[in-house]
């Protein structure tokens, strides 16, 4: 007689429909409970350079060949096999067909080990994005946080502890390092470089969509607009891409002194070191990409006021501010919603936030702008055009 399935008791107790619902709910609890494992594995794969090794190999590698390339002295093959197995499940890598087996006789245990070592791993579209040498690589973004994940977890503990405003200072950074994010970064050149590369890696993947949106919606009028300033423009990647599409523009990139100092110089761009909270150079177009999301409302209002003044000083009746920012409730691509909420919490760590349409509208009004339009693009962010 067939044994009763252990779920049958629960099914009888809960009823078929509730039982199915509970299985789904249990699976979600497990999934969320273990989500940190995926963060650790993603970072680990990049730090060990696994995507780079498979890429350099020109195709899938056996576990043994991969192990030989990793910067680990006495590698635990069984653990590496488990790690790779999970990363295949995450679709970071894919199992590929192993090379033809030799016909040496092996006892059962050896055979099992041999089989694990002969498993082959290849790149997927996800790990293709983690190959460092690729132009649109996201590897620098994965490494943008602290090099040691223990610090990352210690920092993130403030997400919940920080709910208690009485006992904790304002941001994770102030709580953990005793100073705000941009001060920590500014005092640490290696970190500043990593941060800059991390942002550049995001931007390289979105800049085409930004330029395409600007051209499609005729946001930049070639005939009357000749001066653009990219505030918080980092290494100037966005300005360069805009310049390629609108070559008549004179583009200035403004950023903090420690960023400008290390930005690769470009004869077509003018780099200016400055503080947007104090002053924004005059222009017909002021661009800010992923800048306002770093800051709380009061600071954003100050920045917006300075941008408005910069446009008014610029003297064009068609002057405008162009933002490239996440709009949380834009319902263009549901597959991006999770990432948008993730970046929102990432911004909490430094006192910033992502905003909904209503939150943006309130902020623009307080910042002195009478009208705005939101242009969805094929990216996490949207283009938002502000008119004084
Ligand atoms: C998140 S990054 C965005 C960089 C770039 N716009 C992009 O999307 O790739 C924010 C930039 O703002 C710059 N920034 C921060 N505070 C600033 C300030 N007070 N004045 C000027 N730039 C500032 C940072 O150095 C950094 O390059
Ligand atoms: O780690 C990040 C990520 C972002 C980010 C992610 C996705 C986007 O579409 C835009 C930006 O922005 C960051 C940022 O502005 C910062 O100052 C530090 C870290 C990050």
Image (spheres, rainbow, N blue to C red):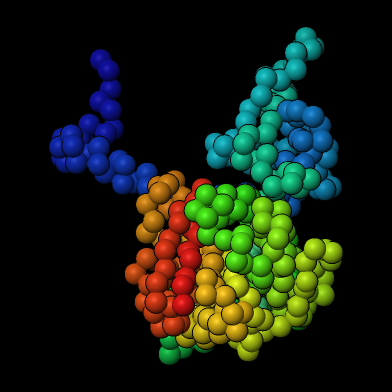
In the foreground, 257 or 165: 257
Is residue 36 among what the camera can see?
Answer: no
In the rendered image, the quadrant that contains the N terminus is top left
Residue 376, relative to residue 228: is it above or below? above
Which residue does the image show at 67% across and 20% down from the upper left? Answer: 97
Which residue does the image show at 79% across and 45% down from the upper left? Answer: 133
Is residue 259 among what the camera can see?
Answer: yes
In the foreground, 383 or 308: 308
Q: Quadrant of residue 228?
A: bottom right
Which residue does the image show at 53% across and 67% down from the upper left? Answer: 323
Q: Position of residue 65 (x, y in %)?
A: 80, 32
Q: Position of residue 123 (x, y in %)?
A: 67, 34
Q: Position of residue 169 (x, y in %)?
A: 52, 87
Q: How many marks?
A: 0
Q: Looking at this view, name the residue that lies furthest to the front.
A: 223
Viewed as shown, does residue 125 lie left or right of 162?
Answer: right
């Amino acid at each position: 007689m067939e044994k009763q399935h252990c779920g049958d008791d629960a099914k009888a107790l809960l009823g078929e429909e509730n039982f199915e619902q509970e299985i789904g709910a249990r699976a979600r609890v497990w999934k969320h409970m273990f989500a940190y494992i995926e963060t650790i594995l993603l970072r680990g794969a990049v730090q060990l350079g696994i995507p780079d090794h498979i890429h350099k190999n020109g195709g899938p590698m056996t576990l043994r060949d991969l192990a030989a390339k990793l910067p680990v002295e006495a590698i635990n093959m069984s653990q590496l096999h488990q790690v790779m197995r999970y990363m295949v499940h995450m679709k970071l890598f894919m199992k590929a067909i192993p090379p033809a087996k030799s016909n040496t006789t092996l006892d059962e245990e050896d055979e099992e080990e041999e089989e694990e070592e002969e498993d082959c791993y290849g790149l997927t579209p996800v790990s293709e994005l983690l190959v460092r040498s690729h132009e649109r690589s996201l590897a620098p973004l994965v490494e943008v946080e602290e090099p040691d994940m223990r610090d990352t977890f210690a920092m993130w503990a403030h997400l919940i502890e920080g709910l208690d405003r009485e006992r904790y200072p304002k941001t994770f950074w102030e709580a953990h390092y005793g100073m705000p994010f941009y001060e920590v970064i500014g005092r640490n050149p290696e970190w500043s470089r990593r941060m800059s590369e991390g942002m550049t890696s995001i931007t390289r993947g979105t800049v085409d969509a930004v330029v395409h949106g600007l051209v499609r919606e005729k946001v930049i009028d070639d005939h009357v607009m000749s001066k653009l300033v990219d505030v918080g423009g980092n290494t100037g990647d966005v300005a360069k891409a805009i310049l390629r599409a609108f070559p008549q523009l004179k583009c200035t990139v403004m950023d903090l002194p420690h960023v400008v100092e290390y930005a690769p110089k470009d004869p077509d761009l003018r780099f200016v070191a400055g503080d947007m909270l104090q002053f924004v150079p005059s222009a017909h177009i002021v661009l800010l990409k992923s800048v306002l999301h770093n800051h709380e409302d009061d600071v954003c209002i100050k920045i917006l006021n300075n941008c408005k003044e910069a446009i008014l000083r610029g003297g064009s009746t068609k002057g405008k501010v162009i933002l490239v920012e996440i709009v949380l409730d834009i319902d263009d691509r549901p597959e991006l919603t999770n990432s948008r909420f993730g970046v929102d919490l990432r911004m909490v760590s430094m006192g910033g936030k992502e905003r909904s349409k209503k939150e943006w509208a309130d902020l623009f009004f307080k910042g002195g702008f009478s009208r705005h339009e939101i242009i969805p693009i094929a990216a996490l962010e949207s283009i938002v055009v502000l008119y004084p």
